[in-house]
Image: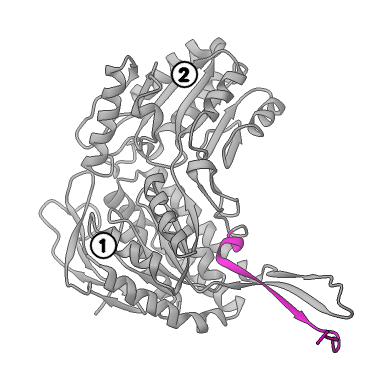
Amino acid sequence: MGRRARTAAPAGASAGPEVTGLRQFIGGQWLNSSGGRTFEDLDPWNGKVVARVPAGDSHDARAAIEAAHAAFPGWTRTSPGVRQEIFLEAAEVLRRRRAEIMGLLAAETGCGHAFGSIQLDFVLSLLRQASGAGYAAVGQVIPSDEPDAFAMAVRHPVGVVAAIAPWNAALVLSCRAIAAPLVLGNTVVLKPSEESPWVGGLLWAEIFEEAGLPPGVLNVVTHARGEAGAIGQELVSHPWVRRINFTGSTATGRRLAEAAGRHLKRMVLELGGQNPLIILADADVDYAVNAAAYGSFLHQGQICMCARRIFVERPLAAEFLGRFAAKTAALPCGDPKDRGTVIGPLINDYALRTVARRVDEAVASGARVLAGGTAAGPCYPATLIVDVPAETELARHETFGPVVIADVVESAEEALAQANDSRYGLTAGVLTGDPERGLALANRLEAGIVHVNDQPIHDEPQMPFGGVKDSGWGRFGVTFAMEEFTEMRWVTLAGGSRSFPF
């Protein structure tokens, strides 16, 4: 059976992808779920069905692990050149399908044109860069005190890697979850989010199958809403899974890490962030307003790197807040398929209600809304809020939506202290007219990533992406991921016969 079973589109669904029945991808075959169940993948803007997707379970996850384990010996022996050809062909398939994938991103995740283009460009670069990773040095020769002995430290693929990807940057984060493990010689079981099973999961099976990836090297298992636990448990507990990478909430990451620890499995975790943007008094105000708007509201604030807290020095505060509030209030909400839309729908009704509840709680506790603050259909408008009490959920937790808190500070030292007074530490930005002062602050910010004279949203495939504290551990990035998805092996060759004491 093929990858898709086409069905008639519902009335009024002419715009956007054709409604399809999808299949899981296990061992090179397109399969229904073991129980035969499906669920509906919905458009967050209009609630229409994008696709009908298999509701997989632990049996499907186990079958995918077994397929990946069986494929590992053959895949790990393939030459770097073979892997490079497959990855470059995957990039070409993605490039050819660009317009279709832009439509999928909008229909499945509410992604607007700007962020869709960013995702596609990033992933094309990631695939092309990763294609050459097999040629990177994988070890070193180490001097030995044994006479004439030859000692090496050599990296080897670990085996089966479980990749658990989120919905928010579905294309980028699913590709990042599988690219380095695959090109380094591992096999992969990918579990996409139930909110993005197609563009964050099954799409990669389509692309890599067309690119010539052997059966079983990449497997994709999907599940219905609320049913991730059984698949996650199978991935964590099965002895053939040797590495797990997860991008998502800190709460879920903590539960997975606790379970993985019981099985002595290493994880790469990229979790939440309460990312600060520090604006010093010598910053250019025009640039600061535009950078803050982009950093706070791209993709409706549903990016782990978004600025959640802005700290602005008092001499610049009045002008900055006035102009930033005006720009925030003017950002258009609406259909993400409209290129003029900046703020599209939140991913689902639960996300919308969570954002609204936290803003309402903050206002009831004394906060003031300078722009936005009231839901409009499936959208929550770009919202700027000040005087937020420290004990509110909005101040303490990552709120995944287009809401940013602004605080006026008396000095850079106060901004630094408040920025570091957080259990999170993913990314940060510093805007200043004095680059040396900015670098000095960057070296004292408790974050895995700091951008001086830029807002917190920035990534490149070759960079060591990851956080500290409750924002996770380990690093993604084409070259840095080698440490995460390979094992170091010490190998010696004796130079002659040793003498033994007995």
Q: Position of residue 418 (x, y in %)?
A: 52, 24
C-alpha distance separating marks 2 and 1: 41 Å
Residue 110 sits inside the magenta stretch: no
Q: Can the viewer see residue 325 in this picture?
A: yes
Pointer 2: what residue? 407
Compared to 403, does 113 lie above or below?
below
Magenta residues?
481-502
Mark 1 nearby-residue class (10 Å; few <14, some 14–19, many ≥20)? many
Say the numbered circle drawn on residue 452: none
- Which part of the image, by quadrant, shows the C terminus? bottom right
Q: Are marks 2 and 1 in contact (CB under 8 Å)?
A: no
Q: In front here: 411 or 114?
A: 411
Mark 2 nearby-residue class (10 Å; few <14, some 14–19, many ≥20)? some
- The residue sitting at the right extreme is 147
Q: Can the viewer see residue 204 in this picture?
A: no
Pointer 1: what residue? 223
Q: Residue at x 31, y 64 (%)?
A: 231
Compared to 221, does 388 lie above or below?
above
Q: Label 2 is placed on what type of residue?
A: Asp
Q: In front here: 480 or 390?
A: 390
Q: Residue at x 52, y 36 (%)?
A: 456
Q: Label 1 is placed on what type of residue?
A: His
Report helix, strand or loop for mark 2.
strand
Q: In front here: 48 or 296?
A: 296
